Image (cartoon, rainbow, N blue to C red):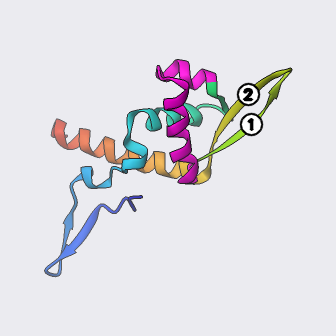
Amino acid sequence: MSTGDATTVRDGQEEELHPIRSLDDTVHQRVRLGVLAIAREADRVEFGFLKRELGVTDGNLSRHLKVLEESTLITVEKGYAGRRPRTWITLTREGAQALETELRALRELVRRLDGT
């Protein structure tokens, strides 16, 4: 994962890195970014809701959740609502930090491109 560093030192001089360098491949992928963004809006989010909101299949969403869980950006909890099995996703502290770093990089990229 990216550290989100905005500068580097070269030949004794500090240089600003291009914001694209702060984007995290794990977070930046569309479905995974969507999972993190939606999970940030709620205490926990149900698998079926994510599937509908993101317009993906069960298998596709499951693969992305596995990547996020292995990266400790989310937790996955399985249980039941009545007799129906359910899967809930919760954003971890690391996930919230990774999302904020990604958003900061995207804001900086937009600022640079808009020339403001």
Quadrant hosting residue 91: top right
Q: Which residue is tagged 2? A: 86
Please name whichever residue, 61 or 114, is drawn nearer the observer in this view of the structure: 61
Secondary structure beneath disc 1?
strand
Quadrant showing the N terminus: bottom left
Q: Position of residue 51 (x, y in %)?
A: 55, 23
Residue 68 lies in the magenta stretch: yes
Sooner in the amino-acid sequence: mark 1 or mark 2 = 1
Instruction: Inspect the image, locate mark 1, and give the three-letter code of the amino acid beneath it.
Output: Lys
Quadrant showing the C terminus: top left
Q: Is residue 36 left or right of residue 78?
A: left
Residue 59 lies in the magenta stretch: yes
Task: State yes or no: discs 1 and 2 in contact (Cβ < 8 Å).
Answer: yes
Secondary structure beneath disc 2?
strand
Disc ID at residue 78: 1
Please name whichever residue, 114 or 52, is drawn nearer the observer in this view of the structure: 52
Quadrant hosting residue 114: top left
**Pointer 1 local density, CA inside 10 Å: few below 14, some 14–19, many at least 20:** few
Residue drawn where x is 33% and y is 48% of the image:
105
Alpha-carbon span between mark 1 and mark 2: 6 Å
Q: Position of residue 112 (x, y in %)?
A: 19, 44
Which region shows up in magenta? 48-73
Q: Residue furthest bottom?
A: 12
Q: Magenta region's main secondary structure?
A: helix
**Pointer 2 local density, CA inside 10 Å: few below 14, some 14–19, many at least 20:** some
Q: Position of residue 87 (x, y in %)?
A: 70, 32
Instruction: Inspect the image, locate mark 2, and give the three-letter code of the amino acid beneath it.
Output: Arg
Q: Position of residue 7 (x, y in %)?
A: 26, 65
